[in-house]
Amino acid sequence: MPKFYLVNAHVPEETVRLLTEASEKREVEVIVIDAGTFDYEPCYQAHPGDLLYRAGVSAAAGYVEQHLYHLNYAQNSPRRDSRPLIDPVDLAAFS
């Protein structure tokens, strides 16, 4: 079952609800990620066939998007570079 990663950073509740309902109708698992509290663990990663949508426009939401994408890219590239795309920082100031 494909997954739909929805990066949320102060996105209207109706937007999240509509995207979630549409995904569930299509049997796509929805994972809503709050950009302000995301913990940047390697277990959060988008795989080929998964969907990733950054609904929020904050810097924190952009960092989450980069984290999810970079882990997938690093695993599927010949380089196998596992270094983080960004340095871990306290992102509370960005949320």
Image (cartoon, rainbow, N blue to C red):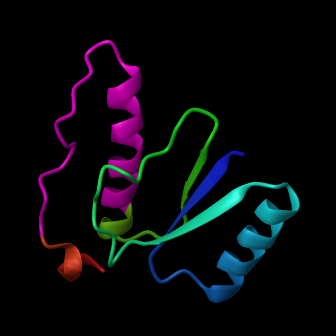
Quadrant the C terminus occupies:
bottom left
Q: Position of residue 63 (x, y in %)?
A: 30, 58
Which segment is the magenta one? 62-89
Residue drawn where x is 22% and y is 26% of the image: 81
Q: Nearer the viewer, residue 42 or 52?
A: 42
Q: Is residue 28 above or below residue 80?
A: below
Residue drawn where x is 41% and y is 42% of the image: 69
Quadrant the N terminus occupies:
top right
Residue drawn where x is 38% and y is 72% of the image: 35
64 to the left or right of 26 = left
- Magenta stretch: includes residue 61: no
- Magenta stretch: includes residue 65: yes
89 to the left or right of 43 = left
Q: Could you say which quadrant of the image residue 53 lies in?
A: bottom right
74 to the left or right of 72 = left
Q: Is residue 30 above or below residue 18?
A: above
Q: Position of residue 40 (x, y in %)?
A: 28, 60
Q: Nearer the viewer, residue 47 or 16?
A: 47
Q: Position of residue 12 (x, y in %)?
A: 60, 85
